[in-house]
Image: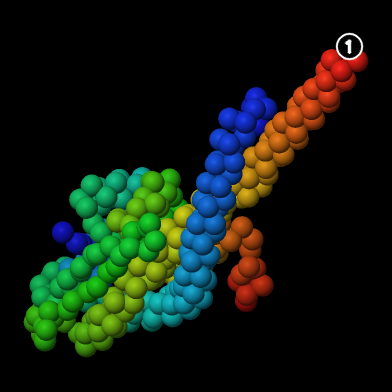
Amino acid sequence: MSKIAFIGDRDSVWGFRAFGIAAIPVADADGARDAFAAAVREGYAIIFVTEDVYEACSEQIREYRDQAIPTVTLLPDVRGSRGLAADEIHQAVSAAIGADILADSGND
Amino acid sequence: MRIRANPNRMQLLRLKRRLVLAKRGHKLLKDKQEELMRRFLGMVHQARALRETVEAELAQAYRAFISARFEMDAPAMEAALASSRRLVELHADREQVMNLKVPKFTVEFPAGAEFGYGYLETTAELDRALELYAAIIPHLLKVAEMEKSLQLIAAELEKTRRRVNALEHILVPSLEETIRFISDRLGELERETATRLMKVKEIVREH
């Protein structure tokens, strides 16, 4: 069973409904946490989250960091990207290498 | 840092065996670290570039969708989206990278599927927005796959690096030091025995 979910504000997720992607609109942080827990229970292989949802659920999401599935991925919402996902890549690099090799090119 | 061990031949042999094992483990882990690092560095720049393009594409698609949304009321929109038959099919596999399992996603669009909603109730804007969405969905999956792989490899690299360091800077030096200590000690004992024997011989000859 391989399904995709997208949790976020309604305008961001809505259009994806046309492709059979489970668009789960949430209005606040509590709703996001519940929706995320439910999405994991239902066994979605990929859970896209907006940056707001990511911040609300960061503890829950961390639990699934070491697993291939579910894969939780950040997407910007309709208001645009705050660059959280780029920060995540940055952090992974620092952790992997033990030094910040992208520091120079990371802020351009 | 010396390991506490009795300075005898038995311990010496045992420690030497441990040293050989530790060095072999160190070499293997070092190789693993190098291979992981090679893959990781190969992916990082690709992932960053991909993330940038996808965010730009998504912003464009969102804009198109919002302008479509202004022209339709919510129930009509909901009905149009719900009646779409262009459902993506996701295949989620796992790919083996060293001892890690990283996700591998592929999507299929049903061949030649139309959105399947009525043309009368929907607008051209919605069509255009959804075409944009359709085009970026494969990219979104690629982002998910790459970023997850990066995270997993990064975590593994960190763990491996810690192990390599522990072997290199703690276990191997302390084994070597202990081995040196024991063989010095054994040499000393041997010389002591030799001189003692010579002394005894001398005493015996004098009588």
| Residue at image mark 1 | B207
How dense is the environment of label 1, judged by Cα within 10 Å: few (below 14), some, or many (20 and up)? few
Q: Nearer the viewer, residue B185 or A74?
A: B185
Of the pair A98 and A62, the residue shown nearer to us: A98
On the rendered structure, is A108 left or right of A30?
Answer: right
- Choose top left, top right, bottom left or bottom right for residue A68: bottom left
Q: Quadrant of residue B147?
A: bottom left
Q: Is residue A96 above or below residue B89?
A: above
Is residue B129 at least partly visible in the picture?
no
The residue at 20%/69% (across/down) is B90
Residue B125, position as x, y percentages in the image: 25, 85
Percent from the top left, x then y, of residue B123? 20, 85
User: Quadrant of residue A54 in the image?
Assistant: bottom left
Q: Residue A92 placed where, x, y %?
A: 52, 60
As shown in the figure, which amino acid type bears the numbered disc 1? His
- Viewer-side residue, B197 vs A40: B197
Question: Which element is circle 1 on?
Answer: loop
**Quadrant containing the C terminus of chain B in the rendered view:** top right
